[in-house]
């Protein structure tokens, strides 16, 4: 799939979700973890630095890099986004990642992640969750991609605890 759309409803404010996506003290807590660092303006730099957990595994370089394309706090963030951890995925180049956050009147706040993966088939397989192995030992699972990340984020914001 060239474009993947993932949606989740979270019992949290748009601002709380925005903060969880953009602030390193939050991004270090859920999903695959990482310390988000970005200049929140069009053309601004976007980088995800490794947490201590990654450093302890020997991964000391940045995990993701990119550029801010569009930013409208707390409702929209569009990034040029590139995975750096795997040389083959890095070689696939930049993709476009968009977060849209909309508070609803009846179902909490809707978070939609749209990832345009045109020209990045390896990354598309990874973020789709294709390599998820529920029977794998901790630290040995390639993960559930965006679906798992968003589920973990939802759990963290609603309960204070992550899934992992």
Image: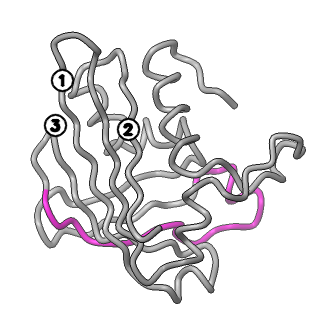
Location of residue 94 in the rendering, given as x and y in whole percent from the top left corner: 38, 79
Q: Earlier in the sequence, mark 2 or mark 3?
A: 2
Disc 2 packing (10 Å; few <14; some 14–19; many ≥20):
some
Mark 2 lies on residue: 7
Q: How is the image coloured?
A: one colour
The residue that mark 3 highlights is 74
Let me know if residue 54 is in the magenta part: yes
The numbered dot on residue 159 is none
- Disc 1 vs disc 3: which is toward the camera? 1
Of residues 56 and 21, the one drawn nearer to the viewer in this rendering: 21
Q: Is residue 25 above or below residue 92?
A: above
- 4 vs 90, nearest the viewer: 4
Q: Are marks 1 and 3 in contact (CB under 8 Å)?
A: no
The residue nearer to you, when weighing 132 against 61, is: 132
Disc 1 on helix, strand or loop?
Answer: strand
Q: Is residue 92 above or below residue 81?
A: below
Q: Is residue 62 above or below residue 128?
A: below
Q: Earlier in the sequence, mark 2 or mark 1?
A: 2
Span colored in magenta: 51-70
| Cα–Cα span, label 2 and label 3 | 17 Å
- The residue that disc 1 covers is 103
Residue at the image point whose x is 46% and y is 26% from the top: 154
* Nearer to us: label 2 or label 3: 2
| Residue 143 in the figure: left or right of residue 73 | right
């Amino acid at each position: 799939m060239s474009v993947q759309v993932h949606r989740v409803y979270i019992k949290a404010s748009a601002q709380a979700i925005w903060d969880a996506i953009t602030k390193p003290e939050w991004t270090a807590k859920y999903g695959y973890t990482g310390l988000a660092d970005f200049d929140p303006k069009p053309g601004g730099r976007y980088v995800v630095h490794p947490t201590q957990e990654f450093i302890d595994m020997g991964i000391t370089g940045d995990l993701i890099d990119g550029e801010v394309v569009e930013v409208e706090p707390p409702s929209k963030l569009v990034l040029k986004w590139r995975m750096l951890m795997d040389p083959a995925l890095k070689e696939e180049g930049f993709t476009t990642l968009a977060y849209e956050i909309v508070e609803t009147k009846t179902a909490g706040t809707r978070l939609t992640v749209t990832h345009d993966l045109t020209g990045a088939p390896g990354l598309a397989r990874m973020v789709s969750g294709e390599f998820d192995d529920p029977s794998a030992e901790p630290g040995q699972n390639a993960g559930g991609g965006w679906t798992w990340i968003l589920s973990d984020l939802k759990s963290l914001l609603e309960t204070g605890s992550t899934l992992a």
